[in-house]
Image (tube, grey):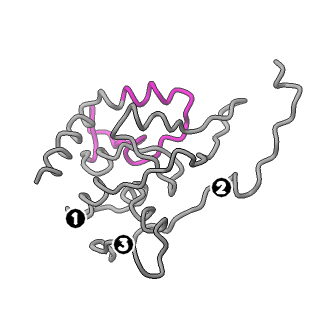
């Protein structure tokens, strides 16, 4: 193909690795970030990065509600990190947020998660109660068949259970 005649442009160090955030400590479970003081507003918003909820083993109801309502979402002009998949370079598509309202992107983990399943899914599902992985405990970072994976996840029983539980949780 025509692209074989051109060398790919090398990425700067900043483009290769996105900024990493520090995870919440277990002792800061009830701490709600402030929007004033020495912390910037951007850092306050990133404290509700869904990847931080994945790292915490147990979330209390206050934390779940905060993550449910105030989960960080990148702006439309956010530059998602590129992933090399074979000869192709792929990245997260912002339009997926409109198609899947439960989808959340983690800058901290550099991948996508199901917000509802991170907060409310059981420990395991399926035959033998297998541990949940992609979109729940691990980020979706391979985007070649991302739409198929997102549709498959949306139709899973544990996802439907998590959506129902989150709807009941936010009403109370």
Q: What kind of element bears circle 1?
A: helix
Structural distance between the alpha carbons of marks 1 and 2:
32 Å
- Residue 129, how many percent across, how many down? 26, 39
Q: Residue at x 69, y 52 (%)?
A: 16
Q: Quadrant of residue 85?
A: top right
Structural distance between the alpha carbons of marks 2 and 3:
26 Å
Q: Mark 3 sits on what residue?
A: 33
Q: Quadrant of residue 92?
A: top right
In the displayed structure image, the side of residue 152 where residue 158 appears, left or right: left
Question: Toward the viewer: 39 or 105?
Answer: 39
Contact, mark 2 vs mark 3 (Cβ under 8 Å): no
- Residue 15, how many percent across, how many down? 69, 52
Q: Nearer the viewer, mark 1 or mark 3?
A: 3
Question: Toward the viewer: 141 or 35?
Answer: 35
Q: Mark 2 sits on what residue?
A: 17
Contact, mark 1 vs mark 3 (Cβ under 8 Å): no
Check the image and report above or below for 42 versus 116.
below
- Residue 133, how many percent across, how many down? 40, 42
């Amino acid at each position: 193909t025509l692209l074989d005649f051109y060398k790919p442009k090398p990425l700067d160090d900043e483009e290769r690795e996105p900024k990493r955030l520090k995870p919440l400590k277990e002792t800061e479970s009830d701490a709600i970030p402030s929007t004033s003081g020495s912390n910037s507003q951007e850092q306050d918003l990133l404290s509700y990065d869904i990847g931080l909820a994945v790292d915490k083993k147990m979330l209390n109801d206050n934390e779940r509600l905060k993550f449910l309502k105030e989960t960080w979402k990148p702006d439309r002009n956010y530059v998602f990190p590129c992933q090399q998949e074979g000869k192709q370079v792929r990245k997260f598509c912002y339009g997926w947020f409109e198609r899947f309202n439960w989808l959340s992107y983690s800058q901290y983990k550099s991948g996508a998660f199901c917000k509802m399943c991170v907060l409310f899914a059981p420990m395991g599902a399926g035959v033998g109660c297998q541990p949940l992985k992609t979109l729940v405990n691990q980020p979706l970072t391979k985007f070649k068949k991302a739409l198929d994976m997102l549709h498959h996840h949306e139709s899973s029983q544990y996802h439907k259970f998590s959506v129902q539980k989150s709807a009941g949780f936010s009403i109370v």
